[in-house]
Amino acid sequence: MSAEITDHDLSRHQRWIVGAPDGERQERQNEIFHDLSLLKANLIGARFSHCIFYRAAFRESELNGAIFDSCKFENCTFEDCVLQDSNFIRAVFVHCTFTNGELQSCTFSECTGPDSIFASSSLTKAAFYKCQLRASVFERAKLKRTNFSGCDLRDCVFDDALAERTDFSDSDLRGASIARVQISHTYFTRCGLAGIRGKPKNPESAVITGADCSEQFDGSALVAADRVIASGR
């Protein structure tokens, strides 16, 4: 990913992102933003294309409806931010965290972000399509009607999360931890579940269809549910 190196002056970027009129900050392409520390920034509806964010800290900021197309984020944090209806398209995340965020209906398409952290974030109706998220952390996250489709979720940590009507279709969950996850009407269709770890907390139902439960799969991890529908089809 390449980007034109522009003026890196911190105050200049701060003024543009926080204080400029909407029309001046609607779209940015091929720019690098680094060492930003933004509190309560307004990025509603903004669009970034082929930009790089390096050591950027967003706190209590609003990014509703923002679009990040082919952007790279390295050592970035989103803390207590609102990203409802935002879109990340082919984004790359390196050592990034989303904590206590509101990511309802947020979409991640073909993104790469191993070791990303989504701890304690609300991901209601969020969608992850063909994302590489190995060893990422979704601890205590709210996964209501969240869709993980064709994702690499190997070794991810979902401990203490809420998975309600969550769909993991065609995703690889081998080695993932689901300790104390509250599972309700969640679907594991054509998933890799070998070596999955931990027991869910008071699970209500799980539907496992055409999944790989071989090797060190702990049968009690998901079969502990009150109503499990398992099928080899």
Image (cartoon, rainbow, N blue to C red):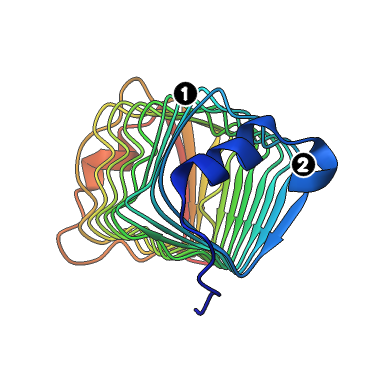
Check disc 2 and give the amino acid type. Answer: Gly
Q: How many marks?
A: 2
Does dot 2 land on a helix, a strand or a loop? loop
- Quarter of the image where one finds residue 123: top right
The residue tagged 1 is 80
**Looking at the image, is mark 2 or mark 1 earlier in the sequence?**
2
Give the residue at x 14% y 60%: 216
- Quarter of the image where one finds residue 42: top right
Q: Is residue 145 visible?
A: no
Give the residue at x 34% y 29%: 181
- Out of 163 and 45, give the one closest to the viewer: 45
> In this view, which residue lies farthest toward the bottom?
2
| Disc sitting over residue 225 in the figure | none
- Quarter of the image where one finds residue 118: top left
Q: Where 29 falls versus 124 (above or below)?
A: below
Does dot 1 land on a helix, a strand or a loop? loop
| Disc sitting over residue 45 in the figure | 2
Residue 177 percent coordinates (x, y): 24, 44
Q: CA distance from mark 2 to mark 1?
A: 18 Å
